[in-house]
Image: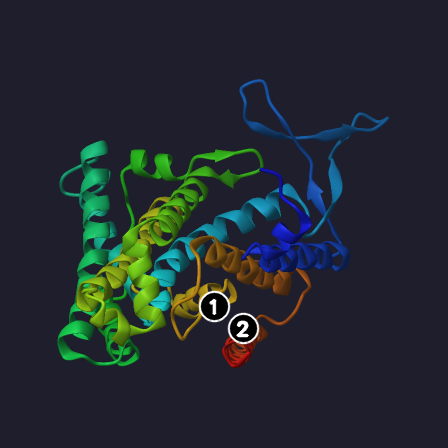
Amino acid sequence: MSLSLRGLLRFQESGLLVVILVLGAFLTAFSGTVRAPLFQQGPDGTRERVFITDANGERTPAFVERNKFLNAQNLAQLAKDTSFIAIMAVGMAFVIIAGGIDLSVGSIYALASVAGALVLNHFGPGGPAGDIGLAGSLAGAAVCLGTALVCGLTNGGLIVALRVHPFIVTLGTMAVFRGVAFVATQGQSVGGFPQSFRDLIRIEVGQGLSVMPLLVMIAVTVVGWVVLSRLAAGRRVYAIGGNELASRFSGIRIERVKLGVYLMSALAAGIAALLSLGYYGGATSGDGQGYELSVIAAAVVGGASLSGGRGSALGVVLGALIIQMINSGIVILGIDQNYSQIIIGSVVIAAVVLDNVNSWLARRRLQKASEG
């Protein structure tokens, strides 16, 4: 099926793609260049420094001028950083589309990573059980994901049972989960994982491109897209976010769906935490600090309406890429890092305002159509 220009313009995420292209072109044009060491692939497949030998036989390192933004190393770093936020943003999309909010994703990320780290440390080279390889890695992964699911069940259960606004519940659990992580570690970093676990997560190709986080991000996005766009469960999520009262009268089990979306959000945070354990090789109770802002910002910028009923998995992933490009641009352009939160917060406000304007225009069109 051929895509016409009109079809492309109607594509839901086309505006986000345009923003990404414009932002990328802007950063490429104004970021300047940097001198980077020149490497080549050695006989054994490893990267080796390139040296230049002058007329006197002296060898000096070779350097090459590269664009600060548009170079393989920076793009690989951008892809890796986007992966963690994008995975969590897909889970957040379920919650926001259903008309809820989850402020505890950063704390769930921290608690899940700490719980998994404690188990992995137990089965690590210096742990009591010794490095038992695959079995220890699987145990750590199970505890990490299981802890995240328990947190999601706690959030969803409290919201459904107490009928309290999700903002209040998740604001409280945000502090509780991080406090539990701090008590479990006494504020100390936990490391010493099985080498086989780290080797699996840290698979890299090319200029340091981390394959595993990228592949997991793609898999999570595809699953989120299928559930939201192709399954009845996804239609129920949209229905509840659009009109909860009408959904209840139509026979949808509201409580079950709400519990499900908070489990999805927590599971996504747990998956991101598991990847971070393998990539960084350690965990602390301070991990994920401020992630809730980045994740919610990615979802909102990606088209998920805070009033519920609208959004897509692909959109929030593109939103996560935009947020990370902004963060990367702040560093590349030499802007004071203290302004990053101000800029991200302003982007969220702008996205919410545009969403409200779009909703108002849609209501006006429906009103005129009904009057006509």
Please report the residue visible at 23 percent of the width from the left and 32 percent of the height from the top. 134
Q: How many marks?
A: 2
Position in image of residue 283 (x %, y %): 31, 55
Question: Dot 2 corresponds to which residue?
Answer: 351
- The kind of residue on which mark 2 rests is Ala
Which residue extends farthest front? 372
Task: Identify which residue, 310 or 281, lies in the foreground.
Answer: 310
Position in image of residue 65 (x %, y %): 76, 44
Circle 2 packing at 10 Å, graded few (<14), some (14-19), many (20+), is some
Question: Dot 1 corresponds to which residue?
Answer: 300
Q: Secondary structure at mark 1?
A: helix
Residue 243 quadrant? bottom left
Q: Is residue 21 above or below residue 107?
A: above
Residue 286 visible: no
Q: Is residue 82 above or below residue 46?
A: below
Please report the residue visible at 52 percent of the width from the left and 60 percent of the height from the top. 319
Q: Is residue 369 above or below residue 326?
A: below
- The answer to whether residue 259 is left or right of residue 31 is left
- The C terminus sits in image quarter: bottom right
- The kind of residue on which mark 1 rests is Val
Nearer-N-terminus badge (1/2)? 1
Task: Identify which residue, 228 or 350, lies in the foreground.
Answer: 228
Q: Give the spatial CA distance, label 1 vs label 2.
A: 6 Å
Position in image of residue 13 (x %, y %): 55, 56
Please report the residue visible at 72 percent of the width from the left and 30 percent of the height from the top. 51
- The answer to whether residue 369 is left or right of residue 151 is right
| Image marks 1 and 2: residues in contact by CB distance under 8 Å | yes
Q: Secondary structure at mark 2?
A: helix
